[in-house]
Amino acid sequence: MMNNKPEGDMGEQSAAEYILKHGYKILERNFSCFYGEADIIAEHKGAVVFIEVKTRNGRGFGSPAEAVTASKRRSYVMIALNYQKIKKLYDTDMRFDVIEVFPGARGEEAEINHIENAFDASDFYSPRGRRY
């Protein structure tokens, strides 16, 4: 089995540097709870942003964002709700972004594609808080 952890770690570092340059404040990295792990949790313009980072060397198997399955999106929503409860952030806007990272050749910068509002929590919950 192939180990993608070094590539993933490099992608997360590139994504973190990118968002810092664009005015985000990183609150957590690799936040883990019962529901899974959020790569980056940041604050931007008053919203808490949960960021899934996907790193790929090529586009042969589709875009990295396409790898963020419904199951992964559902996990992120649950992680966000858990984080909101732990941090008592009840009146705070939340957003879910995906950052695609394509590592550059030796010495070149990575290509970053930041997809803001990549998905919405309402995809998984009705207004009454019931799961679909």
Image (cartoon, rainbow, N blue to C red):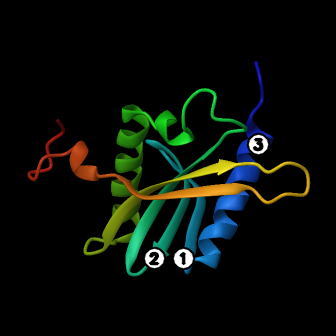
In the rendered structure, which amino acid carries the disc numbered 1? Tyr
Q: Nearer the viewer, residue 2 or 87?
A: 2
Image quadrant containing the C terminus:
top left
Amino acid marked by disc 2:
His
Residue at the image point whose x is 33% and y is 72% from the top: 89
The single residue placed furthest to the top in the displayed view is 1
Which comes sooner in the sequence, label 1 or label 3? Answer: 3
Q: Which residue is mark 1?
A: 24
Please identify the residue farthest to the left as the structure is shown. Answer: 128
In the image, residue 13 above or below residue 78: below
Q: Quadrant of residue 72?
A: top left
Alpha carbon of mark 1 to alpha carbon of mark 3: how far? 23 Å
Q: Is residue 67 left or right of residue 96?
A: right
Which residue is located at x 41 percent, y 60 percent? 83
Image location (x, y in percent) of residue 117: 37, 58
Rendering coords of residue 41 (x, y %): 51, 63
Query: Looking at this view, is 74 or 99 the one in front?
Result: 99
> How far from the left and from the top, in percent, is residue 77?
35, 49
